[in-house]
Amino acid sequence: MTPFRTLSAAGFAATAITYGPARMGFGLFLPQFKPAFSMSTGTAGLISSLGFLCFVLALLVSQFMTSQRGARLPVICGLIAATAGLAIIAAAANLPVLCLGVILAMSSAGLSWTPFNAAVHCSLDDATRPAALSLISTGTSVGIVVAGASALLLSASGISWRLCWAAFALASAGALLANWAALRSAGTTARAQDPPRSIRDLVQPVILPLLGTGLCFGTTSAIYITFAADRIAGAEGSAGLPAGMAAGLIFVVYGVCGLAGLFTGRVKRLINLAWLLRGLMGISALSLALIALAPASWVAIVLSAGLQGVFVMMTSAVLAFWCERLFPSLPSVSFTLALLVAGTGSVIGPAVAGFISDALGWIPMFLGAAALPGAAAFAIQPRFLQERPAPA
């Protein structure tokens, strides 16, 4: 296989597991977890925020590993954490054990994605890097589709949710073995692309729009994946389907529509970065508003899930290639910084949203979340966006 195919396939498998069931599975299976472990919505939000906090810490560990040992070590450690966390969730007998499994599983995403920016930068040419990074980030879609299909199977057949999580753990072990083999060469050279540099190299005005995009993305996407399934499960008139089946179907739509991330680079070339970001923020706001106002309408909730899937996967791809192009000498460090900001939003968002939901209800919570990307869509100005470093 060519380096393009090898890296793209390895990254696709890693993100499919770590950003699919490992990162999104808790929110998808929340309708099953709440009665099984006697959880309130506020407690669920705290567990989700704790998982995202460990994701943020894992980003820092991943960056250190990449700079010292190359891309292979953090990716392998991330997939080990995913496999262990998914297995612990499958066997959890009480809430603390479940929380431990969620923490390990969600931290795996922080360890295993950003190293691919460095590996792609040093192994591929400038023309093929955006396509490879888009393929890698879109692995999340397949992981979410598989997780959603598993929830559908659970509801239709009555099998235990524990079997689904055991299957996720086995799939993660397979991805671990595949990446162990695929990253042998990339893992020894990727570190050369992020030499020791001062953080001041990144503290420039041109990075502010990128970080603002990451913050809005992290906050709203975390709220959606944590609470959307529970919002649907609690709505009346869900077309006569069991609540678990409704939530599973929505996440399948989310993942399938997220495959639009494969075309992010092409869309950006057609309409430019500013209009792409405006469109993504607009569809995120609409997605959150629909789930707030019409959770029992199949047209509305399928549209909401599809729009959210497009927003998450395309924005993920934008952040990846925007960092690589704006800071070509620091591709992994810059992407880690963007994801740290996004992770900060992911830590704060679910915790605050969970308590707002308990105090005021679902509608104010989701509409408040929708206001963030709605405001961002109007705030984006082309003159403030820069894709390439300024000439020396």
Image (cartoon, rainbow, N blue to C red):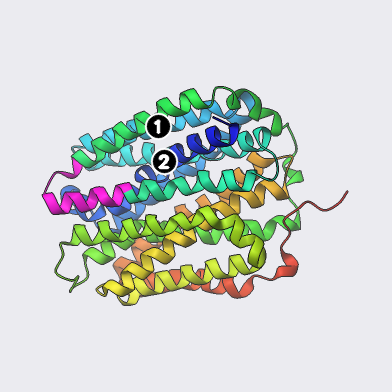
User: Which residue is drawn at the image coordinates 72% and 50% (left, top)?
Assistant: 326
Give the mark, 2 or 1, whose residue is nearer the N terminus: 2
Q: Which residue is mark 2?
A: 18
| Above/below status of 127 relative to 122 | below
Marks 2 and 1 in Cβ contact (< 8 Å): no
Estimate the x, y position of residue 134 in percent, counting from the top left: 55, 49
Q: Quadrant of the N terminus?
A: top right
Estimate the x, y position of residue 185 in percent, counting from the top left: 59, 23
Residue 62 sits in quarter: top right
Q: Which residue is mark 1?
A: 175
Is residue 161 highlighted in magenta? Answer: yes
Residue 86 seen in the current view: yes
The kind of secondary structure element at disc 2 is helix
Between 150 and 161, the residue placed more toward the observer is 150
How many C-alpha atoms fall within 10 Å of the one at disc 2: few (<14), some, or many (≥20)?
A: many
| Above/below status of 96 relative to 322 | above
| Magenta range | 146-162
Between 166 and 111, the residue placed more toward the observer is 166
The rendered magenta stretch, by its main secondary structure, is classed as helix
Is residue 212 highlighted in magenta? Answer: no
User: Which residue is drawn at the image coordinates 74% and 39% (left, top)?
Assistant: 329
| Above/below status of 230 relative to 161 | below
* Amino acid at dot 2: Thr
Between 164 and 13, the residue placed more toward the observer is 13
Estimate the x, y position of residue 100 in percent, counting from the top left: 32, 37
User: Which residue is drawn at the image coordinates 28% and 65% (left, top)?
Assistant: 231
Apparent side of residue 131 relative to residue 34 in the rendered image (left or right): right
